[in-house]
Image (cartoon, helix red, strand yellow):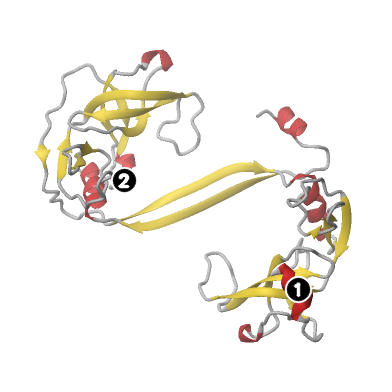
Amino acid sequence: MTAAAEAAASPPGVLRAPLVVEFPFTRSLGPVQSAFLTGLRERVVLGVRTTAGQVMVPPVEYDPVTAEEIRELVQVATTGTVTTWAWNDHPRPNQPLDRPFAWALVRLDGADTALLHALDAPGPDAVRTGMRVRVRWAAERTGAITDIACFEPHEGPADPQAGSHDATFADPVTGIVAEARLDYTYSPGRAQTAYINALSERRTVGERCPSCHKVYVPPRGACPTCGVATTDRVEVGPAGTVTTYCVVNIKARNLDIEVPYVYAHIALDGAGLALHGRIGGIPYDQVRMGLRVEPVWTEGGRYPDHYRPTGEPDADYDAYKELI
């Protein structure tokens, strides 16, 4: 989207900001996936034979038909046939190639299923279903799917197929880190823009449904119950009531808060919906349902750092039971 199109897509005054969501997931590998990735490091492609005799590449640990555990590994060729494809005209960062390429499903010789990977071709006119390709290996291989740099067109004979393989490799790969990342531009919309701007002034503003009169904080722009727009802004709080909570005992990366601590649902006075907040200023084992709390702001903060007890008597259960 061009800058002009982005500007036109958001009404004046509505916030926009780049947002990155990433989650590096560390997982251990069973014997089948370990053999597959270690094999790629050694320029060997392994599949697994199912109960019915099919060879699946990439391999799986359980038969998709019978759910039986399967362990018979089979070496297949590094040549194969394109079964279907799609052209990628604008590669994104960290994709296999930094120039236009095809995403292709390739059935390697000796396999009965297809492997998804990049196909390096000069243009979409050079790609077709049924074309012959072969693996282009990465110069440096570590035991990952990226050890296959891509596929490339191949006019020569098929590679020999080795058949059963004992998967005996030195220094097998036993674990991987799967990087998941999403970069996009986020706009909170009209209602939440007003909410965020009010927070910067140390005020909490929700919106009331004109039909059921419930006040949503943070506002959503429309009532999910009645399906009508919520345009009547209402300032709530600043104090509120803990409706329920959890004790956090695992320290999160890049979060400078000592464990254990408490994260709670807090129904601000005048709100018809509880929001999330951390509870501070009190030992974690003294936090309780009905505890009355107020926000604590840090210098220059755009939202409350945490909530602390107000010293008021606890709220009666009937006053907040519908907000749990």
Residue occupying image coordinates x 68% and y 84%:
282
- Image side of residue 104 versus residue 31, left or right: right
Residue ID for mark 2: 144
Residue occupying image coordinates x 25% and y 43%:
59
Residue 227 vs 310, above or below: the answer is above
Residue 212 visible, this angle: yes
Do callouts 2 and 1 mark residues in contact (Cβ within 8 Å)? no
Locate residue 131, reporting x and y percent. 29, 18
- Image side of residue 148 versus residue 23, left or right: left
Disc 1, SS: helix
Locate residue 298, reporting x and y percent. 76, 69
Residue 298 visible, this angle: no
Residue 16 vs 76, above or below: the answer is below
Locate residue 70, reporting x and y percent. 20, 49
Residue 304 vs 165, above or below: the answer is below
Locate residue 191, reporting x and y percent. 80, 49
Disc 2, SS: loop
Q: Given the current orientation, which residue lies at the most extreme top position?
A: 125
Badge 1 amino acid: Tyr
Residue ID for mark 1: 320
Location of the C terminus by quadrant is: bottom right
- Image side of residue 227 versus residue 167, left or right: right
